[in-house]
């Protein structure tokens, strides 16, 4: 990867932070609106992700500030609303795929910038997101 500036890294981290905010809103919304025979299990599934996403958001905001940037306060976009649990889970799966791709790219940027601690921290987040993607895939196979 070509050389990465501090500003480019901050910009990328802010994109990631906006997506973490979006994920928090999505999980809270889906937990509140999920219905059907598996409501309780799915509500718990969605709610258990909120603390992890909050931890990721706090990490990103702290890192952006440490690099001299200003953390974004805006979620990345609108939340796809679904009336059915399968649609919710498919949106979660799509979001996890995109998140993993973004964090792999950010890890490469951190390495190119020379921030190997950040690259290592992002690797851990990638592992967490991958586990959540796999759990979502298992739920979708059952439906």
Image (tube, rainbow, N blue to C red):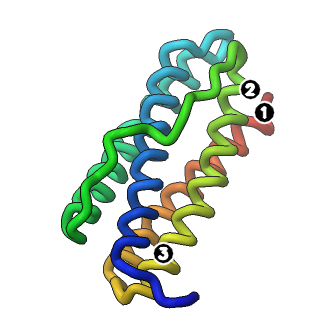
Dot 3 or dot 2, earlier in sequence: 2
The residue under label 3 is: 107
Kind of element beneath mark 1:
loop
Could you tell me which quadrant the C terminus lies in? Answer: top right
| Residue ID for mark 1 | 142
Secondary structure found at label 2? helix
Disc 1 residue crowd, few under 14, some 14–19, many 20+, Cα 10 Å: few
In the figure, 96 relative to 110: above or below? Answer: above
Distance from the alpha carbon under mark 1 to that under mark 2: 10 Å
Q: Earlier in the sequence, mark 1 or mark 2?
A: 2
Decide which of tag 1 and tag 3 comes sooner along the chain: 3
Q: Is residue 126 above or below residue 49?
A: below
How many residues crowd mark 2 within 10 Å: few (<14), some (14–19), many (20+)? Answer: some
Q: Find the distance from the CA under tag 1 to the CA under tag 3.
A: 33 Å
The picture quadrant where one finds residue 114 is bottom left
Give x and y (percent) for residue 100. 59, 60
Residue 87 image position (x, y, % from top left)? 73, 26
Q: Is residue 41 left or right of residue 28?
A: right
Q: Residues within 10 Å of mark 3 (few under 14, many from 20)?
A: many
- Quadrant where the N terminus sits is bottom right
Q: What separation in Å lies between label 3 and label 2 (alpha carbons)? A: 31 Å
Instruction: Look at the numbered disc 3 and give the secondary structure of its residue.
Output: helix
What residue do we see at 49% from left, 30% from top? 27
Point out the frontmost of discs 1 and 2: 2
At x 40%, y 36%, the residue is: 50
Q: Are marks 3 and 2 in contact (CB under 8 Å)?
A: no
Q: Which residue is mark 2?
A: 86
């Amino acid at each position: 990867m070509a050389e990465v500036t501090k500003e480019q890294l901050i910009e990328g981290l802010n994109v990631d932070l906006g997506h973490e905010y979006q994920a928090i809103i999505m999980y809270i919304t889906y937990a509140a609106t999920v219905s059907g025979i598996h409501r309780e299990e799915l509500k718990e599934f969605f709610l258990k992700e909120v603390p992890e996403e909050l931890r990721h958001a706090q990490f990103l905001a702290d890192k952006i500030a440490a690099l001299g940037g200003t953390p974004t306060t805006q979620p990345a976009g609108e939340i796809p609303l679904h009336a059915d649990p399968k649609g919710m889970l498919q949106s979660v799966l799509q979001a996890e795929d995109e998140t993993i791709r973004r964090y792999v790219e950010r890890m490469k940027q951190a390495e190119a910038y020379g921030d190997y601690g950040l690259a290592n921290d992002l690797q851990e987040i990638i592992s967490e997101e991958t586990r959540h993607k796999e759990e979502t895939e298992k739920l979708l196979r059952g439906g």
